[in-house]
Amino acid sequence: MSLMALRLITNPSILTHTSSLRLHHCSPLPLSPKKPSTTIAPATSSMATTERIPIVIDSHLHVWAAPQEAAQKYPYFPGQEPTLPGNVDLLIECMEEAGVDGALIVQPINHKFDHSYVTSVIRKYPAKFIGCCLANPANDGSGVGELERLILKDGYRAVRFNPYLWPSDEKMTNEIGRSMFSKAGELGVPVGFMCMKGLNLHISEIEQLLTDYPSTTVLLDHLAFCKPPVNEEDHHILSSLLNLSRFPQVYVKFSALFRVSRQPPPYLDLSDLLSQVVSNFGAHRVMWGSDFPFVLSECGYKGGKEAVEQIANQISLSQSEKEWIMGKTMARLFKSPWHEA
């Protein structure tokens, strides 16, 4: 997520929920109209056969309390008040319109280390959502016990390492980072890395942790923030991402396309990048993610999902590969609460 954007002061007019806002934000990208079929299928007994519907799981999104909820029960972290709505009711509305079955909710910086709102959501909708907590790299080591509690008591299924929350003179490979990374592997939960300022700044730390703790699964948020290369440095950074495929425990989120594309929706400049990621990692280690609610002001929630489908079609991915990316990878990695339809 964009930390800079979240430091903005809340704009009450933006946070006001209206029907028109919901419809606009959840609406899909404009697609080329399809010609209606003039063929009428014969009424045979074979039509009664239930067609398998591929499961669709969003690997990366956020929710936070509405202003009234924040005032009464789930306060925002000071200075991190959101500038747009992101409560669970709006999310569910968008998911239903887009045909998305479930999601991994990543703890937002708006509530920082107070996980109470996200915890309330995953408890209320256990068949739809699982949670990814936020690692607390405090020097006193309290984050290790906090991580264990969030996983064992509150049921979180992943943890996010945000390197910009570490003390400025510390790296994610310090004693605290190693303890949390090791603990995540011990408890069987993946660690997601947010390399917002560039994978090249953190690649050595990630490779070191992967080498020293091979039992810990890793998720690279938003293509590790690698953009379609336009110069030698970009090509080098992309090569660093692709080289991480040598670690079988690494998965890539094809998420927040608006953050990594250099073009407007449907972000077709990401086609070659996705093709290379799939070729190196395999579709069974790639997963789509929307980055709700930030996607709402870009192309809409449904539009973000349809952009992935258009990109996949442009590089002629097989139906099986598309199913892995759109949900099967998530369903297989996290096993429950979803099942493959």
Image: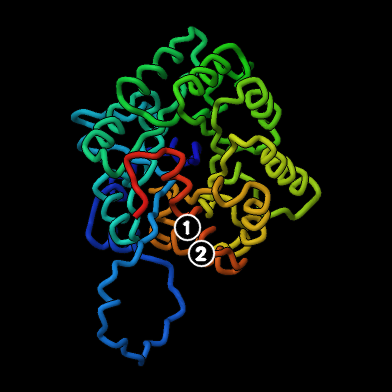
Q: Is residue 313 visible?
A: yes
Instruction: Name the mark on residue 74.
Output: none
Q: Looking at this rendering, what residue extends furthest in the bottom direction? A: 38
Label 1, secondary structure: give it. Answer: helix
Q: Is residue 193 visible?
A: no
Question: Disc 1 marks which residue?
Answer: 323
Measured as percent of width and height from the top left, residue 278 is found at 62, 53
Instruction: Give the quadrant of residue 36.
Output: bottom left
Q: Residue at x 45, y 74 (%)?
A: 31
Measured as percent of width and height from the top left, residue 324 is found at 49, 53
Task: Tally the marks.
Answer: 2
Mark 1–mark 2 contact, CB under 8 Å? yes
Q: Is residue 38 above or below residue 133?
A: below
Label 2, secondary structure: give it. Answer: helix
Q: Is residue 163 left or right of residue 15?
A: right
Amino acid type at image mark 2: Gln
